Structures are given as C-alpha cells and as structure tokens.
Amino acid sequence: MQDDVRISCLSGFEGKPVTIRGWLAGRRTGGKIVFLLIRDGSGFCQAVVEASSPDAFSNAQSAGLESSLAITGTVRRDERAPGQFEIAVSELHVIQNVRDYPIARKSHGIDFLMSHRHLWLRSRIPWTILRVRHTVISACREFMNRRGFVLVDTPILVGGAGEDTRSLFPVDYFGEKAFLTQTGQLYLESACMALGKVYCFGPTFRAEKSKTRRHLCEFWMLEPEAAFASLDDVIQLAGDLICHVVGAVLKEHSADLEAIGRDVKPLCNIAKPFVRLTYSEAVELLRSEQTRIRLETDMAHGRTRLQYLADELEKAEKRLASASKQNQKDSAGAKIVSLREEIAELEAELAAMPEHLRLAQSFQWGNDLGGSDETIVSRSFERPVFVTHYPREAKAFYMKLDPENPRVVLNMDLLAPEGYGEIIGGSQREDDPDRLVERMREKGLNPEDYSWYLDLRKYGSVPHSGFGLGIERLVAWITGRRHVRETIPFPRTLGRFTP
C-alpha cells in the first residue's frame, strides 16, 4: 500500500492500491455509480465509487463541494478521465463535510470572484494560471543563473523615485519620508559594478490611478543588470529569455493551457529573430493607411461577433426559462453570465476603437506609446516586437542619450504579440556623471537625493545596461488572459486591496 500519492504521480501506480488526500471539485451520479472529481493541488483525477462499497458510496453521495477527503483505491487507466487515470474507490473518508461553498460550479461575475479570491484560487483556471506562473518564475531564475547572473536582493523601502515621482507610494520611516520601491534598478547598477552581472526578483509598487487591464499597484519584476553591456547586448538577452520561458511553459503546460482555452499555436511560433522597429518607425506604422484599414476591419468583425453573442444570449435565456432540472438551470445560468461578460467587454472594446484609431492616426512624435498604441503595433506582427530609441522627454532620467541623435535615448520596449503590449522595458544607462545630472534636472529631480547613485559614475564608470520584465504581463500573454489581475494570487488594484 502506498500512502499519500499525489495525483500528478498516478501514472506510476497503474494497477496498484493508493491513498490520495484532497478536495471534492465536482460530482456526477449515474445509477449505482458516483463519479467524483478530486483535486489535491498537483492535479485533478476522477474517483469512481460503486454501490458495492456502501460506506464509501454513502459518503460520496453526501459530501459537499470542496469537502476534504481521504480516498483509497486502485489506479486504472481510462483515456476519458482527467490525466487519463482514475481511481476505483474502496474506501472514502470525509475529513470535513462542506455545505454551501460560495463558489458553485455555475458562473459568477468577476467582482464576486475577486471578492472571493481566497477561494477562487481552487478553481481550474486560476489553479492553472498559478502553476504556469510558477514555471515562468522558475524558468526566469534558471535562465539568469545559467547565464552567470548573481541574485541581489534590493530594498523595498527607498528614499526617492526610480521612475516617475507621481506614482510613488509614500510611507513613514521613523519620522522620515520614504517610499515603496518602483524598481530595484538603481541598486542593481551599484551591485553590477561589484559582481559584473546581477539580477533581482521581487515586488514593485506604482501608485498609478489606472484601471486598465495592464495595470496593478503591486506587481513582480525580474530585473537583470550587466556591466560592460550595450543596448544591443540586453536586446539579445531579452529575446533569449523570452524564448526560454515560452519553451519551458509549452513543455510543462501545453495541455493545461488548452484546457483553459488558450490557443498554443501562436506560442509555438515564438522564435528569434524578433521584429525590431525604432520609435519613429512605430509612429509611421500607427499613422499608416495599413493601420486604419486593419482597425476598421477589426471593428466590423467585432460588430459581427457582438450580434452572434446577442443571439446566443437570447437562446440561453430561453433555455433557462424552460429548464425543469436544477443542472439545466445551472448550465443555462452559467452560459448567460459568461455571455453577458463577453458582450460587455466587447462593447467596451468596440466603443473605444474609434478613439484608438483617432489617437493612432494623429500620434505626435515625442509622446510615449500608450496602451492602445502598443496593442496596434503588437497586433501587426506574429512575433514579439522590440521598439527602440524613444524620445528623451518620454523616458526616465537614467537612460543614455544616443550619441548620434541626442533627441532619443538608447532604450527598448519589448511588445508581446496578439495585442498584449509591453512586457519588458530596458535601456543602456547613462554613464556620464555630468549628463546624468543634467537629465535629473530635466525631470525635476534633485541630484543631491541621488548622491550615492552619482558615485557610481565617479569611481570606475563603465557602459552598462539592463531591463525589467513584468511577470504578470508575461503570464497574461502566455495564458491568454485579458487582465493581469488574474495572473497574481492576490491582486492589488485601484480600489481593491482585499482579500
């Protein structure tokens, strides 16, 4: 007898008795057989309980959704079962019998689910996303370690802005004003002068009053920094990193992604070389006739899709009105909620598209690319897109001016395809102390607040570069989620910081 076998390991115990411990995720009954869907954190499996085992059969019938269970039985292959293996149950013990679990199998609205995030994590889609997130983070660490980068933990409490002073979270630090970090970059620049190639991975904070699908107030970033590295060096590094991470996720989670509705074909096509545009070329693309035609075509397709969804909603509402059984009502109700959410999202998207088109066609050189601009550019290509050499006024003080054109900086943003936009932002850093002070003053910063940072340019300054990768945005693209709030266990957004 093997005790406490994980569901993910059942394939190694075919024909053998095992005990698993987990939670009841679903149940259906067929005469003298009860089929239970069990999850234990590592996976889902079907447990088959027959009336010939009366105690187990009775417990299987009475246990409520999310009841905790201990199940003993024989593992057998069944191609139709989740994971292609199931357990023929001989014993079933209820550890805690749950009643009125608030997240039923029917569909719920996003506000309800976010308010019950502590429980929603148990459902199949969030469970899958968090496992993919784990693989993404593991692959990032593996990549950086293999490339000779040293992990350096940077402070969360800092004395000044690393990015925009308007998005700082202030805190009291024993009577002094401090802030939650926006980036570990400035400290990594110090560390790379000691260790050569370094990276940090941790939470960062932005007090942006934004409710877009790409924004969180607290998110996680991977930030590498390398001495004696140019912009081209970190572009090469970023491309290699993305290919490595996507490959790792496809190797471990292709079936999981397909199970939650993610088309993996676009991910399978991710390979170098990535597309590379200058900012000026991106501006030309936004203003082009090609972009106007594409957006107008997208709007036409969206209106057709909207009519289809409205027709499906009407059918689902009729099914609900005529349903006589509870499972039929639940199924129709879930379909109605899902359709209404998709309709609302599509209506909002269609309503915004004319404005997005207007902004793109009238885009002024010198502005930073907005979310809608990034979406348009990234939808124009099947592979990730590097956009380089942004105007100096649009970017941070620490980015090095292009010696050949001081109107722009030596920077890059990496835009994920399929309209997901920026997932990486990086640059070559300004290594000239006088030019750095000049740039600080341009941005309204006091150089005295950064005296330690300026020291790096006095004592052995060298060309160096780095970037920041947003984990949540990367996971959103890989898993096909529209909103980054679904890619972090407990999201912090404008207006929500519980549970």
Image: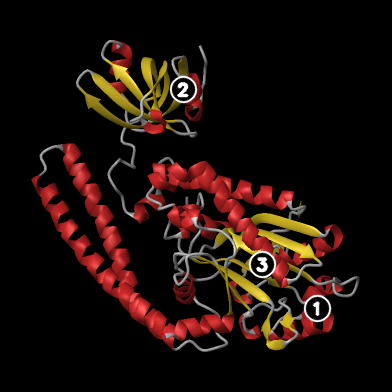
Which of the 4 image quarters holds residue 122? top left
Residue under the image location 21 percent in, 24 percent down: 30
- Where in the figure is residue 221, as x and y percent of width and height? 62, 59
Vertical relation: 8 (above or below) 276:
above
Q: Amino acid at mark 3?
A: Ile
Alpha carbon distance from label 1 to label 3: 32 Å
Side of 25 relative to 209 (left or right): left
Of badges 3 and 2, the one in the foreground is: 3
Q: Which residue is mark 1?
A: 448
> What numbered label is drawn on residue 20?
2
Q: Element under label 3?
A: helix
Q: Amino acid at mark 2?
A: Ile
Q: Amino acid at mark 1?
A: Glu
Seen as rendered, the residue at the extreme right is 459
Q: Is residue 323 visible?
A: yes
Q: Which residue is mark 3?
A: 235
Q: Are marks 3 and 2 in contact (CB under 8 Å)?
A: no
Closer to the chain start, of discs 3 and 2, is: 2
